[in-house]
Amino acid sequence: MNHERPQRKSPRRPLFDYRSMGRYFVTPVVQGRLQLFGAVVDGVMVANDAGKMVLEWWAKLPSKFARVELGAFTVMPNHFHGVIILNGTLERDPPSLSDVMGWFMTMTTNAYIRGVKASGWRRFDGRLWQRSFHDHIIRRRGSFARITTYIEENPKRWTLDRENDTRAGEDEFDRWLLEDAANEDSDE
């Protein structure tokens, strides 16, 4: 009988150095896709106190990590989209994208737990966030602008969002993002 656990496939690009300078589109998603951070009303995201807390921790990333600059970002009912820019550093062992996101997810989890205890926020089972996060390395000219627009307009697209359990169709952006990843080593 084989008692080995199945190997979980890493969502990271093999052999890519996630400590390297660059721009990254990241999306952490709430475990079970529970809508804990607010609601989209008429195409506008209305963040509740938990959603505002997530935004506050995101804004602290450049203070915690000197090499981090923030691009566009938005909180959604059950996930978060943001662009992280990793600049050059003189550090010997600079933080990786996973280090930055791990800190963000840990801090928001701890703050959320405090909100459950102190303010009666909705409880979650096990983990606040899914174990990992989606990322997309932004390399191609034009991709940065397209991703920024997508993030800014994401609440208007909630009815098509793949993280929305009641979505009404497919979002063409998802298809474009896959194509962009497949072509990321070329210029537009």
Image: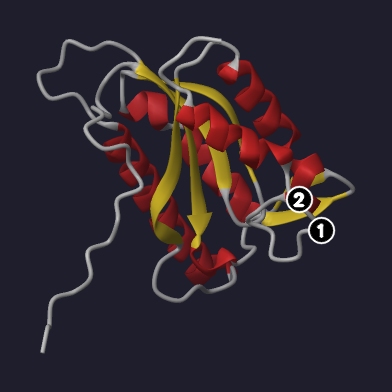
Which amino acid is tagged 2?
Answer: Leu
Image quadrant containing the C terminus? top right
153 left or right of 107? right
Secondary structure category for the residue under label 1: loop
Q: From what the image shows, is residue 102 above or below residue 129? A: above
Residue 173: % across, % down? 67, 36
Secondary structure category for the residue under label 2: helix
Residue 114: % across, % down? 45, 63
Q: Which residue is tagged 2?
A: 160
Number of labels in the image equals: 2
The image quadrant of residue 110 is: bottom left
Q: From what the image shows, is residue 47 above or below residue 33? A: above
Q: CA distance from mark 1 to mark 2?
A: 6 Å
Tell me which residue sits at (67%, 55%) in the image. Answer: 77
Tell me which residue sits at (32%, 18%) in the image. Answer: 67
124 left or right of 75? left
Q: From what the image shows, is residue 28 above or below residue 96? A: below
Q: Which residue is tagged 1?
A: 168
Residue 105: % across, % down? 39, 49
Q: Residue furthest bottom?
A: 1
96 left or right of 134? left
Residue nearer the viewer, 123 or 151: 151
